Amino acid sequence: MENAASRLADVRASIARVCKPARRAPSDITLIAVSKTKGPEAILPLIDAGQRVFGENRVQEAQAKWPDLRAAHPDIELHLI
């Protein structure tokens, strides 16, 4: 099984590939990693690989897992989706 950093790199490479014919810069695209139902142990490898934008769909779930992660990584953006 691939690790989180490898999967994230694959997604970013796919984004870069589709941006080229669309004449868009990959930096114009915001990748929101949906972290619903995943615990901090599954999210931390993505943070370590450079992912900084995450989405949750339940406020209660976000309140339970994100305070410590955001305290350790204050540059994280969290969106309600």
Image (cartoon, grey):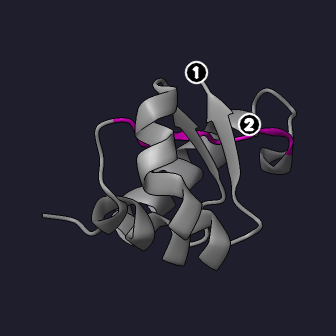
Please provide the residue range marked out in magenta: 28-36
Q: Residue at x 54, y 67 (%)?
A: 69
Q: Quadrant of the C terminus?
A: top right
x and y percentages locating residue 27 in the rendered image: 83, 50
Q: Is residue 77 magenta?
A: no
x and y percentages locating residue 78 in the rendered image: 66, 44
Vertical placement of residue 19 versus 10, above or below: above
- The dot on residue 19 is 2
The residue nearer to you, when weighing 43 against 2, is: 43
- The dot on residue 81 is 1
Vertical placement of residue 50 versus 56, above or below: below
Image quadrant where residue 35 sits = top left
Q: Earlier in the sequence, mark 1 or mark 2?
A: 2
Residue 72 relative to residue 7: left or right? right
**The disc labelled 2 sits on which kind of residue?**
Cys
**The disc labelled 1 sits on which kind of residue?**
Ile
Q: Residue at x 52, y 55 (%)?
A: 66
User: What distance separates the C-alpha of mark 1 from that of mark 2?
Assistant: 24 Å
The residue nearer to you, when weighing 19 against 21, is: 19
